[in-house]
Amino acid sequence: MNKLGIVAYLIFVITLSGCSHPAYKMMTVFNEQEFAPYAKKGTSSIAGQAFLKTRGGEVRYGAGDTVMLVPVTSYSTELWRLALTGKTPSQYDVRYANYIKKVTADGMGNFEFNEIPAGEYYMECPIFWEVAGKYGMERTGARIRTQVKVADGEKLKVILTE
């Protein structure tokens, strides 16, 4: 292999190594007892609207997007912090999915969770759309996230945006 071939090979290897991220191992053990209060029917509700505002001031609603409601526990908090940094765990406990509530926002980004237990929750809704870019259509938008607390019997109103 000549010098140019060696340099090209090294650049290829360096590029590949930059693409692979080490798998993140969860430090927190899934504790079913922490999630148990969120498994039952409750008397509370959370309703709201999910949207983003473009730099030009145009409103982009979470129309047809999934709004997720996740109980705040030590396990979900570790996952939440990972998501905020763009990392994902190598694996997670499959039981976690049993406690995530999901609804689809309507055409104006409105959503509602009914009969939920009182407690603290993480909320998330991905709102993305395409815009013309230098090399064709490009994806833009964001995953909007917040943390809420709802009391027993409360009807909480939430604006989910950045």
Image: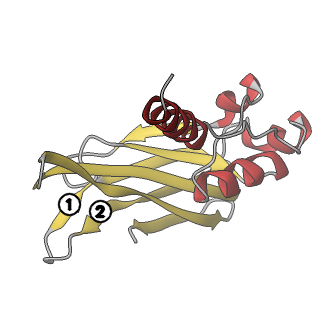
156 in relation to 26, above or below: below
Residue for point 13% across, 77% down: 56
94 in relation to 154, above or below: above
Residue for point 56% across, 47% down: 69
Residue 71 picture location, percent across and down = 69, 49
Taking depth in this image into account, of 148 and 90 the one nearest to the observer is 90
Element carrying mark 2: strand
Q: Report which residue position mark 2 lands on.
A: 51
Q: Which mark is residue 60?
A: 1
Pointer 1: residues within 10 angstroms few (<14), some, or many (20+)?
A: some
Residue for point 61% across, 58% down: 85
57 in relation to 70, above or below: below
Pointer 2: residues within 10 angstroms few (<14), some, or many (20+)?
A: many
Taking 156 as reference, is 29 left or right? right
Residue 127 picture location, percent across and down = 32, 52
Q: Earlier in the sequence, mark 2 or mark 1?
A: 2
Taking 132 as reference, is 141 left or right? right
Pointers 2 and 1 in contact (CB under 8 A)?
Answer: yes
Residue 30 picture location, percent across and down = 86, 36
150 in relation to 10, above or below: below
Amino acid type at mark 2 = Phe
